[in-house]
Image (cartoon, rainbow, N blue to C red):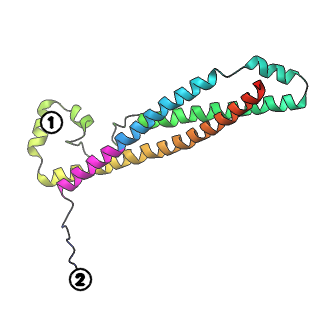
Amino acid sequence: MPTQLKKDKYSKEDALSTIERNIGWINSADNKASIMLGVLSFLFGGLIITVDSVKLQQMIDSGQSSQYIHAIGIALSGLTLSISILCTVIFLLLVLIARTSHIVKDSKNSVFFFNDISNSTLLEFHEITQRINEEEIIEDLISQVYATSLVATSKYRYLRKGYISFAIAVISSFIYLFLMYLLFK
């Protein structure tokens, strides 16, 4: 039977490795959101030029039920497209918002978190780093692991919602473009 190595406790290296991995996930979410915002602006810009409100008004005023239904289909797909684009932008911006406040309740100031460091003077920070012992460093790192995990989870929740609303926007844009194609055919 193979022997399994068992660690006594979570080490400083384990914490640093986990923080680095979490920051990688955070950066990945930010990159994905930025790319999607670029694609969305291209998609939205291309669709805006296809709007012909005069032609839609003529269809509605024509009195023909088939023309009226077609115009309503275009309007509804355009409305769905607009709402889904707005939701996508909001969700993706929520991914990109920096989270620099204390996420972990009842946590002490960290010697690793830039926001906590910048809230003290150089002399105060120097004194804190001179007084801290190895156990306190590990506890601080563990709280940073937890905080970066919360940030990554929050970003990916919004990114998932952004993906869903983006998919709805893409589907709506295809329906909208198909209906506009039928209009000008």
Q: On screen, 1 above or below 149? A: below
Report if residue 17 lies within the magenta region.
yes
Give coordinates of residue 166: x percent, y percent.
56, 38
Residue 180 vs residue 148, the one in the foreground? 180
Q: Residue at x 79, y 31 (%)?
A: 72
Give coordinates of residue 156: x percent, y percent.
44, 45
Disc 2 crowd rating (10 Å Cα; few below 14, some 14-19, many 20+) is few
Q: How many marks?
A: 2
Q: On screen, 146 above or below 95? A: below
- Look at label 2 and name its amino acid: Met
Residue designated by label 2: 1
Looking at the rendering, the stretch of residues picked out in magenta corresponds to 10-25
Query: Which mark is nearer the camera, 1 or 2?
Result: 2
Residue designated by label 1: 125
| Quadrant (top left/top right/bottom left/bottom right) for the C terminus | top right
Q: Residue at x 56, y 44 (%)?
A: 164
- Look at label 1 and name its amino acid: Phe
Residue 31 vs residue 114, the one in the foreground? 31
